[in-house]
Amino acid sequence: MPRGSEIPEGIRSTAVDLHQAGKGYKFISKTLKIPPSTVRSIIVKWKRFNTVVTLPRSGRPTKANPRRKRRGTPDEANAAGPASDKSGDPDKQKDISKVLAAAGNADSNSSDPERSKEDRAPSGPALLGGDKEMRDFNSSYEEGDNTGPSGSDEEPMSSFLFARPTGEAEDHERADHPERAGDREDPEEKDASMVDEDAEPSDTDEEDPLASYIFAREGPGEKHKNWASCDDAPEEDPMEHIFDPNFDGERKIYAGSSVSVRALLLLLLAFLLKHDLSKAATKDLLALLKLLLPGCIPSSLRFLKKHVTDVDNKTELHLYCPRCENYLGIDPGTECGVCQQRLSKKSLLEKANYFLVMPLETQLRKILTRVHSKLGKHVTRGDCLSDINSGGEYKHDEQEGSITLTFTCDSAPLLNSSKFSVWPILCTINELPYAERCRNVLLHTLWFGKGKPLLQCFFTPFINELHKLSHEGFTWEDDSGLELNTRVTAKVCVCDSKARSAVQNFQPFSSEFGCGFCYHKGELVQKGRGFSRVYPVQADGCDLRHMAETEQLATLVIENGYPQGQMGVKGHSPLLLLPSFDIIKGFIPDYMHSVCLGVVPELVNLWLDPLYARKRFHLSPQSLKELDKALCAIQPPDEIRQRPRRLSDRMHWEASEWRAFALLYSPVLLSKVLPKLYYKHWMLLVSSLHVLLSQFASQEELSCAELCLVQFVSQVQSLYGLEHCSFNCHLLMHLSDCARSWGLLWANSAFVYRDVHSRLLQLYSRTESASPHTFKQFFSYDEMIRRGSDVLKDVSAEITDLFSSMTSCGILTKSSNYISEDAFTLGCGSPRSLTVRELAALQSKDSWPVTEYSRFVCRDTLVTTLDYSVSCKRNNSVIETTGGFVLVESVVVLEKPCSCGKASGCCCRELVVFGRKLLLANSQPTIQNAQLDRNIAKFLVRVRSSEEVCAVACQDVVGKCFVMEQKGRLYVMRMPVIASL
């Protein structure tokens, strides 16, 4: 019976020829337009039978035939197979050359984001030194190194990256290393057990593209210096000195343009980083811009690669054993010291048994040179708690001439259904103000793989470097050239409960003594069809953990071999080796995980779950529709990045959305929806969070917030049931102690690292060369921010806004709109004269020329006029001043003759805000708490509009407020510290 859809013999022969030329399966598939599985079947068939001809079914050898003739030697195969046709048939040789040339052109011009390994990996004669080296390299690359365990269940990153043939590795290695032949099975047995050509090809056996580049460039004993592809011509580019300080920065792209060449290239680099364009797309973009703007665009990619970042020659690859995950360091030996596994650096790199490290010293030196003037510039107010420098633990260990770090090691899955995850170690400098900490996050370690890393191995480079930095410090120069020596210690670790128990080496919170802060045992109760561990409030209190006791318990567990641990301690934590770090007090119950992703969604889901329809706290479907409608009508300020979504879509809400709902939306929306008893209980949590997330909090306010949290947790059992006294509710009891030790909750929360996590996941999802590409893109972004601050000093607002939007870095420059140290305007102003009412508000009869603006920034807080807020559907127009609440109507800059006598033509610039006063309403929201003897709804203020115009100076602005209208009533709340520009 004839076979249908059969691949022509010529195409199959060409596939074999391409394979012998060193091309991979994906490249051949793309070139010949046939599936990769078909290519694999063709190659496997040729290796087994030395032919690509379709044999008759009756004469075809079967896999189980013990008398099947053993295949010929490689020399015989080359003489009898299609390779001999290539050398004997000139016409066929020409056809193959044409195919190879066409394939190479298609490969270099491809713009497909899902391009193959050859598109991603550096290739070409310019890199590898000729076609012969190309073939030799690809041949050795496909060989691999099979010193690792063949039956291991653990698949490192190689299973995620690029497929490689599996049937030829042993043959090549046996040929190259005959001394190892005795360690393997008999060649005839191996040949008889080869994969059948009908077998389904596997795409899980893949390699890391970084290894191909390393081995292509390294000679014997030579260390790799650069990961970037350098396939462009080495000649000097006319734009080479564009970022040189002596370059003419005023040179415009054309006569009459406001855009300089330097600004254009910076915007181009930012565009390429944001969209992560392929090489082909980048070349096409450069060619297009060169046609439009000749002489202003670099001639090759070499310039762009050179000026993006210098991360390549500073990144370290730290290797680990594939069997036991023992840390091996940068240069491993030939054998693992723990499991005696035979090791090969080449094999470890190919199979991605490594993680990447960027030394802290390198990053700190660059950051401190730029922002050293802001060290220790925290805003303080007497004895009030505020930033991390006001905490008791920070003050206790504060040392002159040193800096401290807060770090996180939370994991993030690539996809909800993916087994692969990202584990970074991110750090921030505690001595920087909060806004600067958010802008200067350091990435030290990046691990990517299946499951999670062995924490002892994962933390080793971080601990080793901090040992050096804490004892010896590092030297750096400030902008005046003064050389300084600074020591570095890590003080705080931020992570969720699951990662925290793993890092502390404690039992998880679902086990006995699962709390890492106290000795609460918990109890098992029935919940649904199973059991759950709950943490109700204990009447006699609960003892707190201490580091000395923890070390003793860990030693006891190790010496006696207790399998279940003691008092929740399973053994020694790797962070016990971290200098000056307290394994108990150094961790915090992060409110992003425990509150925004814990208690808040837990209670909201209880209110709306149909299973609890008969409970008093249940909200009807009609109430849900009203809440959805009210949420969609809210116009939040810019601090809340995402507009409110319906509660019906709460399963897709992020932590910031739950935070906004709890702090700002729910006090007004739930007042008439939730039963009164449950609403009062909910307001205990909300009022305490407003204190713990305020800019400043006195000791008295902190004590009141602590009592509110205790009442909230203790009433959960009576209102919702014992089964809902979750571990997240228990963590609320430790929030106030954390604030006393390390500042208010916003000073050291995981929200600081949220954007970095999102950026890492985005980069992973858009590239096949996972770890190296992400590392490069991350540090390239930081380099762009630094260059933007230097280059875009005196450019138009349109250029600054475009650069800020592409880099998502907020406000970078103050340019010509600079008013004072803490205030500057945004956008283009328009000249006008003051009105009579405005002159009366200023209490002045002199009418100076003024320039009106729609936006200004005061102490890192964006404020806009009412008209601008209506147009952009973001309300940033309500502020709190020393005289009350004000609705901003206009913002002007007064330019009047200078009275200081510095110069005859000098002018004083003063920013003045004109607005309408918001007066307090006659009735205010009141929830009187008998135990506290105070109104816990004091943070919620009801106001009414007035026609009284007032003038407010910039120094009189206290902060921005959130305003919300509900059934004709206006409510105002002071904005908690939840974001930073």
Image: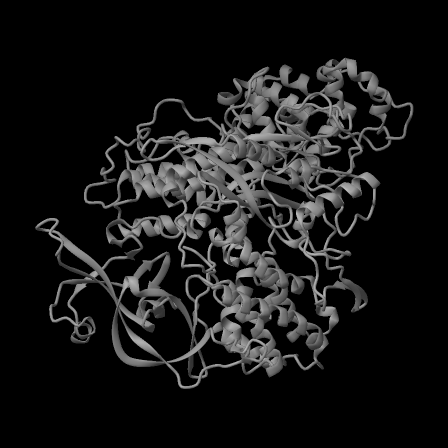
The quarter of the displayed image where residue 282 is located: top left
From the viewer's side, name the closer residue of 9 and 631: 631
Say left or right for 834 vs 346.
left
Residue 829 screen position, x and y as percent: 22, 59
Can residue 831 be seen here? Answer: yes
Q: Looking at the figure, which quarter contains the N terminus?
A: top right
Point out the residue furthest to the left here: 904
The quarter of the displayed image where residue 842 is located: bottom left
From the viewer's side, name the closer residue of 898 and 60: 898
Question: Which residue is found at the position 76% from the left and 30% from the top?
Answer: 54
Can residue 763 be seen here? Answer: no
Question: Which residue is found at the position 52% from the left and 33% from the top?
Answer: 469
Q: Looking at the figure, which quarter contains the C terminus?
A: bottom left
> Compared with residue 516, is residue 41 higher up or lower down, i.e. above or below?
above
Residue 700 screen position, x and y as percent: 50, 67
Point out the residue furthest to the right here: 66
Point out the residue furthest to the bottom here: 922
Question: Which residue is found at the position 79% from the left and 43% from the top?
Answer: 557
From the viewer's side, name the closer residue of 521 and 25: 521
Residue 898 screen position, x and y as percent: 13, 56
> Compared with residue 887, is residue 784 higher up or lower down, i.e. above or below?
above
Residue 836 screen position, x and y as percent: 16, 75
Say left or right for 901 vs 43.
left
